[in-house]
Image (cartoon, rainbow, N blue to C red):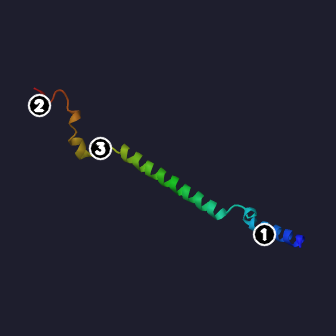
């Protein structure tokens, strides 16, 4: 009787620890890796777009209204 109980307890312990022997879930790992890659790619794209818009030259209409470039010889200073 003692052997049956010990065998049953061993079998229960073995089957309950089966998930420990299953190994990593590669589908979840690859999905998380792809999501992180997409996030980094999106951030790089947004940074590049922000950088490019900051480096664009001033449009002609705004340049005509830019009064900081008025020279000292302008008639309004007299």
Circles 2 and 1 in contact, beta carbons < 8 Å: no
- Name the residue carrying label 1: 12
Q: Secondary structure at mark 3?
A: loop
Comparing 51 with 31, the one in front is 31
Counting from the top left corner in percent of width and height, residue 22 is at: 73, 64
Placement of 57 over or under 77, stated as above or below: below
Q: Secondary structure at mark 2?
A: helix
Which residue does the image show at 89% across and 70% down from the upper left?
A: 3
Comparing 28 with 6, the one in front is 6
Comparing 74 with 14, the one in front is 14
Which residue does the image show at 29% across and 43% down from the upper left?
A: 58
Circles 1 and 3 in contact, beta carbons < 8 Å: no
Comparing 22 with 64, the one in front is 22
- Name the residue carrying label 2: 76
Q: Quadrant of the N terminus?
A: bottom right
Q: Closer to the N terminus: mark 1 or mark 3? A: 1
């Amino acid at each position: 009787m003692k052997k049956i109980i010990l065998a049953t307890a061993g079998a229960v312990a073995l089957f309950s620890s089966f998930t420990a022997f299953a190994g990593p879930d590669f589908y979840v790992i690859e999905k998380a890796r792809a999501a992180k890659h997409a996030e980094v790619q999106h951030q790089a794209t947004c940074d590049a777009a922000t950088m490019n818009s900051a480096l664009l030259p001033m449009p002609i209409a705004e340049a005509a209204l830019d009064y900081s470039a008025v020279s000292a010889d302008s008639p309004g200073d007299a």
